[in-house]
Amino acid sequence: MSKGNIFLINKYMKIVCLYINKLLGLVMKKLIINFWYGQISLWKSYWIIGELVNAIVIFLIINIEIRYLNNIHANELLPFINFYNFSFLNKVLIIIWTTFITVGIWRAAENYKGNFIWIFLTLLFLSYRIFTMRMIFFN
């Protein structure tokens, strides 16, 4: 291949990558907005975002606390996570993240048209989650 062809292929690859990046950004933005307004089904909101994605976010925050902020207390409390010894920045991140997922799941429960027991159990669990947020600042 000549140098001109490689340059053109490189140029087109950059354009395709930018287009895919923009498209994925729009899809993620729409997904986040739909979740915030409760327009995603209750089971997806609760199990995928409220449990799976939440576990990944908490795992990342714990790793940031241990590796980059050198919090040796976070290592000792891993079976039972206690956010009391976390840095202020991570506490704020956890509060923002928990508020986001709680509002999204709560609204999805309000929009749910199925059996009432699932709405009740979801709202009960979310109330417990909000109640336990006090442990971030008070032990």
Image (cartoon, rainbow, N blue to C red):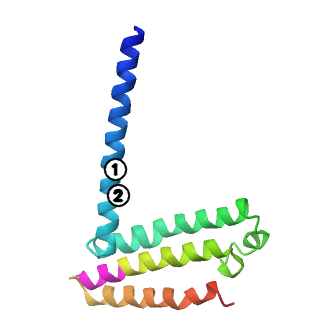
Extent of the magenta region:
105-112
SS of the residue under disc 1:
helix
Q: Residue furthest top?
A: 2
Give the image location of residue 67, x and y in percent.
72, 59
- Would you name the residue on which mark 2 appears? 28
Name the residue at 53% across, 68% down: 55
The C terminus, quarter of image: bottom right
State if disc 1 and disc 2 touch (CB < 8 Å). Answer: yes
Q: What residue type is disc 2 on? A: Met
SS of the residue under disc 2:
helix
Instruction: Mark yes or no: residue 84 visible.
Output: yes
- Is disc 2 surrounded by few (<14), some (14 to 19) or many (20+) residues within 10 Å? few
Tell me if 57 is positioned left or right of 82 in this view: left
Tell me if 10 is positioned left or right of 96 in this view: left
Q: Which mark is residue 24?
A: 1
Name the residue at 69% across, 72% down: 78
